[in-house]
Image: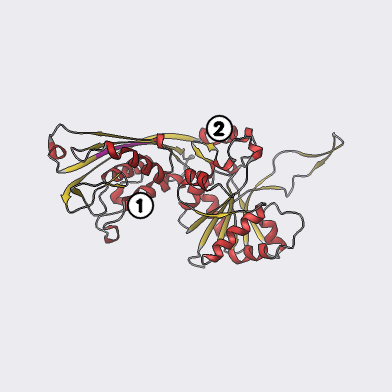
Amino acid sequence: MSNPRVAALIVAAGSGSRAGSPVPKQFAIVAGKPMIAHSHAALASHPAIATVIVAIGAGQEAALAAAIGTAAIVIGGATRRDSVRAGLEAIAAAGGADRVLIHDAARPFLSPRVIDRLLAALETHKGALPALPVADTLVRFDDGAMADNVSRDGLYRVQTPQAFDFDAVLAAHRGWPGGPEPTDDAQMVRANGDEVAMVEGDIMLEKVTYPADFAAAEARHGGGLVSRSATGFDVHRLEAGEELWLGGVLIPHDKGLSGHSDADVALHAITDALLGCTGEGDIGTHFPPSDPQWRGAASSQFLQHAASLIAARGGIIDFIDLTLICEAPKVGPHRAAMRARLAELLRLRADQVSIKATTTERLGFTGRGEGIAAQAIATVRLPEPSSGEQR
């Protein structure tokens, strides 16, 4: 199949009571942002995945929106199986897919390499799952006393996401005969007569369930990250007859910024700062002004693309600081709206975004009201490449 339609389903409908948190664990903060935001960003930024849907519990809509912004959702059921079935049916109702990845929100640190391995395995199998070999000694206990050792040969710890031919997993769910609740979807597909392959898992995919797991996740993820900062700078001319987009917000003004896209000088500067953190060139490298498809394009696309490159590497955006340089319009009345919009686009809290404004005391092109300049600095954390790894 040359270009299969791939969907992803995140199961996030649980109450998370075992985590001991006042909020469901999928919305608790891990490594700087809500747990679900990590896996959603990893799946949404993968080039092979076209659609991501999230199965949540009834009444969790506001919590999900606060965690990741706008997302495709379905209300889950009483069990994990019910939630997955609801998600699969929603995908089917929207036109279906060729393949689907089903992922638990409690495994936040998802590598694109695991996704690649799973999708490759679907070339020859109806299902695939990531797993790691069991390393610990296993024993049985009878009445509190140690009994026999259990051989570790052939034993593996199963992780998610699990990947399937969409029709195969949907048929397995629709035809499930009942009985004991399955612990994962691979059991159901295998019970329905299809073979499930195993691919190499990832230690970073450890499940976060109990309070101690949160500390372990912080240590595991934070310990391998290196902080980077980079700046971005952009200028656009003010012209009559143009709309003024600034920081993702349409601002009433007698002039607007002129450029190939919507000329949002603030988003352009931040985009370049984020690209600088990854060493991925600049905005013109990814969205050349000579390409007609970007004429009049919303600059939010450029910003989210840069953020997706960071997410695909397992990175975290920590802070954005933006300075706007202009005589007019006055930024103060629009600062809160711009800050909220930037936080929404980058899946950050508002306190992770700073917006300042200054003038040049009527000196230079900004002082004469001919244009607006923007300077931004981004601070991110990225996994340090292993020895010999090419980026």
Q: Is residue 323 above or below residue 300?
A: above
Residue type (three-letter) at the residue carrying disc 1: Gln
Secondary structure at badge 2 equals: helix
| Left/right of residue 231 with respect to residue 343 in the rendered view | left
Q: In terms of secondary structure, what is the magenta stretch mainly?
A: strand
Which residue position is annotated with label 1?
301
Q: Which of labels 2 and 1 is toward the front?
A: 1
Would residue 14 be counted in the magenta stretch?
A: no
Label number found at residue 11? none
Which corner quadrant of the image does residue 364 belong to? Answer: top left
Q: Residue at x 35, y 52 (%)?
A: 301
Q: Residue at x 67, y 52 (%)?
A: 78
Residue type (three-letter) at the residue carrying disc 2: Ala
Q: In front here: 346 or 111?
A: 346
Residue 41, how many percent across, how many down? 48, 48
Q: In front here: 77 or 110?
A: 77
Secondary structure at badge 1 equals: helix
| Left/right of residue 121 with respect to residue 365 in the rendered view | right
Residue 307, how many percent across, how many down? 40, 46
Q: Which residues are magenta?
A: 374-378
Q: Is residue 22 above or below residue 284?
A: above
Q: Earlier in the sequence, mark 2 or mark 1?
A: 2
Q: Residue at x 17, y 54 (%)?
A: 241
Q: Is residue 179 above or below residue 331?
A: below
Distance in Å between CA atoms under marks 2 and 1: 33 Å
Residue 146, how many percent across, how many down? 84, 35
Which residue position is annotated with label 2?
219
Q: Is residue 48 above or below residue 321?
A: below
